[in-house]
Amino acid sequence: MAIIEGFRVRNFRPLRDVAMGRLSGGQGRPLTPFTVVIGKNGSGKSSLFDAFGFVADCLATDVETACDMKQRGGFERLLTKGEQGPMRFEVFYREAPNERPISYELSVALDKAGRPYVESEVLKQARKGTTRARLFPFLSLHSGKGTVWSGEDALEGADEEGKARSDVELTDRRQLGIATLGTLMEHPRIKRFRDFLKGWYLSYFYPDAARGLPSAGPQRHLNIHGDNIGNVVQFMEREHKARFNAILTRIAAKIPGIVKIDTDVTQDKRVLLRFNDGAFEDPFFAQQMSDGTLKIFAYLLLLEDPEPPPFICIEEPENGLYHKLLDSLAQEFRAHATGKKGAPQIFVTTHQPYLVDALTPEEVWILQKGTDGFANIQRASELEDVRNLVAEGLPLGGLWYSDYLDAR
């Protein structure tokens, strides 16, 4: 499964220029399969989380709609204070560990009428036979016009490049080029990136949504709000009993008393999610369960998806959870991100030291606001004192609580 090695965002809210991991310049170490961003309130964690969401929403809708979504409020509110634009994003990833790296660069600006549009969009890849060489564009669009190379190899500069190169012009500058070109058989690389980006899962789960009564019927995947959790349980009970039993075993270890979770269908064909506590004869329904129980169950259900999304983003998973569950939850995230081929990459933001205690300095990034009001980011492993103290056995979250990870 593809893995993001680096991500850069510029001119997006307080993120004037924030880069993580390895980018197209070839510098830096790649992001880990399980990556966690920490920081104080107001440091920019939510903005970084939403930067991933914004790129995904640009594909799912268009750049104007993505800007105008309720939580964003338009291009002007997204643009970094004092900047003229454009907003820029770069995703650097590989389709598999030993595959050639690919870089996707997106710039969003305002046109003369004040409407957001795709100023530029570039997909680049190293030539065949190399893994860390110079990247060549196989899609290059500016204001909806540009060039695309078909097939599997970037032919920039090669004798036969004319056979694979064609000029393109989009009819709508608000749409991403990969949205259209990625549907064509002659552009398999664009299709794979489009499918990868389309598969990103950003969790906006909230327990009240999971307490709803959806129409009955099995569904394969948990949606971003979690309001179909009962439908997914129906599917897992029917199609993947072993996986579902494994979830029950793990949740029973985390939340004493839970011995069974299943569903019941009402007369009007609504699905009820039931939790059986061994201390009580009658089951509890989702509407009666705590926020923490619902969240833990939803996360385990997401991780055990037989066809998991390639990239999972979760903002502050600790909210509503007992602090002693956080170490176990972090271990679950890491195990699923690193345990097997095809596992999802997991990206988490948190402000909870108990969760950070379970992490290594290589997995943790520290987001802070500088004196100029703009965010900057640093990997915890770059701090020599922190590396040495962790090597001596001190927990990383405890060091954060003691201000070793904050600017000094």
Image (cartoon, helix red, strand yellow):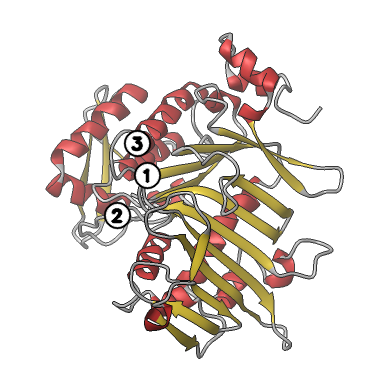
Q: Residues within 10 Å of mark 3 (few under 14, many from 20)?
A: many
Query: Can you tell which quarter of the image residue 268 is in?
Result: bottom left
Residue at (56% x, 84% y) in the render: 144
Q: Which of pointers 1 and 2 lies earlier in the amino acid sequence?
A: 1
What residue did someone put label 1 on?
97
**Considering only vertical position in the picture, is 371 above or below 178?**
above
Please state which of residues 352 and 101 is positioned toward the viewer in this rendering.
101
Q: Residues within 10 Å of mark 2 (few under 14, many from 20)?
A: many
Residue 146 is situated, as x and y percent measured from the top left of the image, at 53, 83
Tell me if residue 255 can be seen. no
Q: Are marks 3 and 2 in contact (CB under 8 Å)?
A: no
What residue did someone put label 3 on?
336
- Looking at the image, the residue that sits furthest to the bottom is 171
Query: Can you tell which quarter of the image residue 162 is in?
Result: bottom left
Residue at (57% x, 26% y) in the render: 361
Q: Is residue 164 left or right of residue 317?
A: left
Number of the label disc, if any, that sits on residue 221 = 2
Question: In the structure shown, which secondary structural element does the residue marked by tag 2 occupy?
Answer: loop
In the image, what residue type sits under mark 3?
His
Q: Is residue 97 left or right of residue 105?
A: left
Residue 110 is situated, as x and y percent measured from the top left of the image, at 70, 79
Label 1 to label 2, Cα distance in Å?
26 Å
Quadrant the C terminus occupies:
top right
The nearer-to-camera label among 1 and 2 is: 1
Label 3 to label 1, Cα distance in Å?
17 Å
Q: Which of pointers 3 and 2 lies earlier in the amino acid sequence?
A: 2
Q: How many marks?
A: 3
- Looking at the image, the residue that sits furthest to the front is 159
Residue at (26% x, 41% y) in the render: 274
The nearer-to-camera label among 3 and 1 is: 1
Please state which of residues 309 and 193 is positioned toward the viewer in this rendering.
193
Residue 114 is situated, as x and y percent measured from the top left of the image, at 72, 83
